Image (cartoon, rainbow, N blue to C red):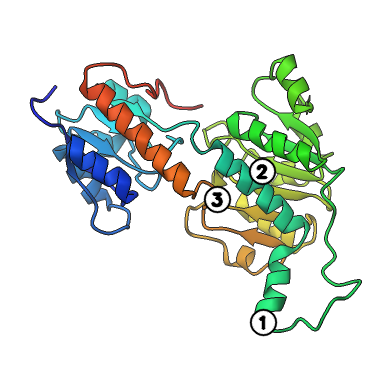
Amino acid sequence: MPSGRLSVVVTRRLPDVVETRLKELFDVRLRDDDTPMTREELVAALREADILVPTLNDHLDASVIAQAGDQLRLIANYGAGVDHIDVATARQRGIQVTNTPGVLTEDTADMTMALILAVTRRIPEGLAVIETGQWKGWSPTALLGGRVSGRRLGILGMGRIGQAVARRASVFGMQVHYHNRRRLREETEDALQATYWESLDQMVARMDVLSINCPHTPSTFHLMNARRLKLMKPSAVIVNTSRGEVIDENALTRMLKAGELAGAGLDVYEHGSETNADLRALTNVVMLPHMGSATVEGRLEMGEKVIINIKTFADGHRPPDLVLQSMD
């Protein structure tokens, strides 16, 4: 452990309160502008810092981590997902990795329900009519959406966020179904009024709304591929607030254009910020700029977890949010 204050490099702008606290505790280098570091800048930071605080935009693969200096001992990720970090390589080099789980559960679940409502009730189309001055008054047949109450919601991934979505959906009168790598305890299922499906294929074929709430791992890449998307009912809606790579975006776009799916609500995309132009042009698709976790409260709580992980590590103890292995 280096003597004196630890050298911490932060790769993106963080909320002022978080940055101020980091400066009070550590020898910290902050980012002047809110743009991702280049690969070269990341490597330079890894060679300089005792601790790196990256975000999901920073791709720390094996070749980047291999260039880290011997002094780097902790990667304190600002975010829950760690699929952008080669955790195994980091651990081989004696570098610990932490994340910020749990604090974004409610915010992301709120956004999932917002997207379900936005797509099924055609809210963006209504906004467009107002914003373009086309609205001429109420009409009994204009912008008819669908009632969410009574619809079957299939949740793919029943972790913290999936369960939070289930609780909200039940209040809206939706029937909750789920597929998960492991079945929940019976008492948890009962509390959520959720029906488990061992077969993902059978579940998606019967749902009115499908919510993607599983992480991106090698085993979930394109889990919703073209074959599985085609199992969905033409009247069904798919919503994704998890990771874009879980859905084959090209196949999804083709089906939406062909009317083989009723709509989609997306907050994440297969290629990050590079969104599909054909997808953007569709009126039955609601697209958001990865803002599912974007609340003041959530961002501050993420910062608090980062600081606690660093401080615990600096004090010679095991950080509370230590990531033990890559997700698979």
Which marked residue is nearer to the observer: mark 1 or mark 2?
1
Vertically, is 95 above or below 134?
above
Q: In this orientation, does residue 263 appear? A: no
In the image, what residue occupies the spot 48% across and 35% down?
103
User: In terms of image quadrants, where is residue 32?
Assistant: bottom left
Q: Where does residue 109 sit, x and y in percent of width and height?
A: 62, 41
| Residue in front for this viewpoint, 176 or 274 | 176
Residue holding disc 2: 225
| Residue in front for this viewpoint, 253 or 114 | 114
In the rendered image, the quadrant that contains the N terminus is top left
**Callout 3: SS:** loop
Q: Relative to residue 147, is residue 284 drawn left or right?
A: left
**Callout 2: SS:** loop
Q: Amino acid at mark 1?
A: Thr
In the image, what residue occupies the spot 67% across and 58% down?
253
Please report whichever mark, 3 or 2, sits nearer to the chain's N-terminal start.
Answer: 2
Q: Which mark is residue 132?
A: 1
Please report whichever mark, 1 or 2, sits nearer to the chain's N-terminal start.
Answer: 1
Q: Where does residue 83 sit, x and y in percent of width and height?
A: 44, 36
**Callout 1: SS:** loop
Q: Where does residue 214 sit, x and y in percent of width and height?
A: 59, 35
Q: CA distance from mark 3 to mark 1?
A: 27 Å
In the image, what residue occupies the spot 55% across and 36% down?
105
Q: CA distance from mark 3 to mark 2?
A: 16 Å
Which marked residue is nearer to the observer: mark 3 or mark 1?
1
Residue holding disc 3: 268
